[in-house]
């Protein structure tokens, strides 16, 4: 029963992925933002670089967690090493920090613009 339920979910994701053409699904967007938000939430410092195309979170161990554009994806790197795809099918990313809030704007390959904002607790005296 569990296998058939999992298979149905995989088939659904595969079919819905085809329907998106050159973009990404809402679920992919939500998961990627949650990953970025969690890294920032657990960081002692958060900053942007390269005119906002890079978001850097320095964790409590002093490691720099970097989210940047690589080809048509946002990837995560730790201290300049590794390559973890976070969100695929993008053409641009712009991050900014204002009043303790990360403002993130992403454009997909199908020219849709997605925006979100989340607090950076280190700026607010937390974390």
Image: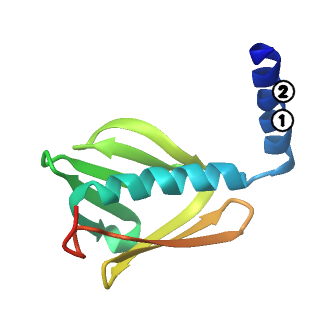
Q: Is residue 91 above or below residue 3?
A: below
Residue tagged 1: 12
Taking the image as shown, residue 90 lies to the left or right of residue 6, namely left
Q: Residue furthest bottom?
A: 99
Are the residues flagged by discs 2 and 1 in contact, CB closer than 8 Å?
yes
Image vertical order of residue 11 relative to residue 39, above or below: above
Q: Which residue is mark 2?
A: 8
What percent of the width, then of the height, locates residue 75? 45, 46
Work out whether residue 66 or residue 110 is closer to the camera in this orientation and state it. 66
* Disc 2 secondary structure class: helix
Residue at image coords 80%, 34%? 14
Picture quadrant where residue 12 is located: top right
Q: Secondary structure at mark 1?
A: helix
Q: Is residue 98 visible?
A: yes
Residue at image point 86% right, 37% down: 15
Residue 117 numbered mark, or none = none
């Amino acid at each position: 029963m569990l296998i058939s339920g999992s298979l149905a979910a995989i088939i659904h994701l595969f079919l819905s992925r085809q329907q998106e053409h050159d973009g990404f699904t809402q679920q992919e967007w939500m998961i990627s933002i949650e990953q970025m938000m969690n890294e920032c939430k657990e960081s002692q410092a958060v900053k942007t670089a390269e005119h906002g195309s890079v978001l850097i979170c320095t964790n409590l161990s002093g490691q720099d967690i970097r989210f940047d554009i690589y080809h048509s994806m946002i990837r995560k790197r730790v201290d300049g090493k590794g390559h973890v795809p976070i969100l695929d099918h993008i053409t641009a990313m712009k991050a900014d920090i204002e009043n303790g809030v990360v403002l993130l704007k992403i454009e997909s390959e199908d020219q849709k613009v997605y925006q979100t904002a989340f607090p950076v607790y280190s700026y607010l005296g937390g974390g």
